[in-house]
Image: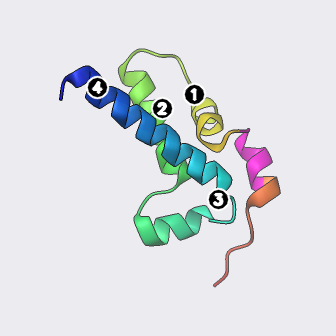
Amino acid sequence: MDEHTRTELEAAAFRRLVGHLRERTDVQNIDLMDLAGFCRNCLSKWYLAAAEERGVEMDYEQARETIYGMPYEEWKARYQTPRQD
């Protein structure tokens, strides 16, 4: 497989993952961290790091909005539930 095709496939898989996480607002970040070792915030940080590596100007809140599909504070107010201990 050539590099361009690989990149396109990886990008499509990433978009599908982000879309899935946007739909599954019932899944809390803490649950993702406990089970998978990463969460939406991790994806935001990885997205930001990739942008910075390529010289794309972006801040953490912009990266979060890309992953969450809305400003983080709005997502948190709508969907984040208190932690169950």
Give the mark nearest the N terminus, 4 or 1: 4
Which residue position is annotated with label 3? 24
Q: Is residue 75 inside the magenta stretch?
A: yes
Residue 48: image tag? 2
Judged by depth in the image, the label closer to the viewer, 2 or 4, is 4
In the displayed structure image, the side of residue 13 where residue 80 appears, left or right: right
**What amino acid is found at the position of numbered circle 1 in the picture?**
Asp
Check disc 2: other Cα within 10 Å, few if <14, some if 14-19, many if 20+.
Answer: many
Judged by depth in the image, the label closer to the viewer, 4 or 1, is 4
Q: Which residues are magenta?
A: 70-76
Give the mark nearest the N terminus, 3 or 2: 3
Q: Position of residue 53 (x, y in %)?
A: 36, 23
Q: Quadrant of the N terminus?
A: top left
Give the mark nearest the N terminus, 3 or 1: 3
Q: Are marks 2 and 1 in contact (CB under 8 Å)?
A: yes
Q: Is residue 14 above or below residue 29?
A: above
Residue 5: image tag? 4
The reply to whether residue 44 is visible in this rendering is no
Q: Quadrant of the C terminus?
A: bottom right
Give the mark nearest the N terminus, 4 or 3: 4
Residue 59: image tag? 1
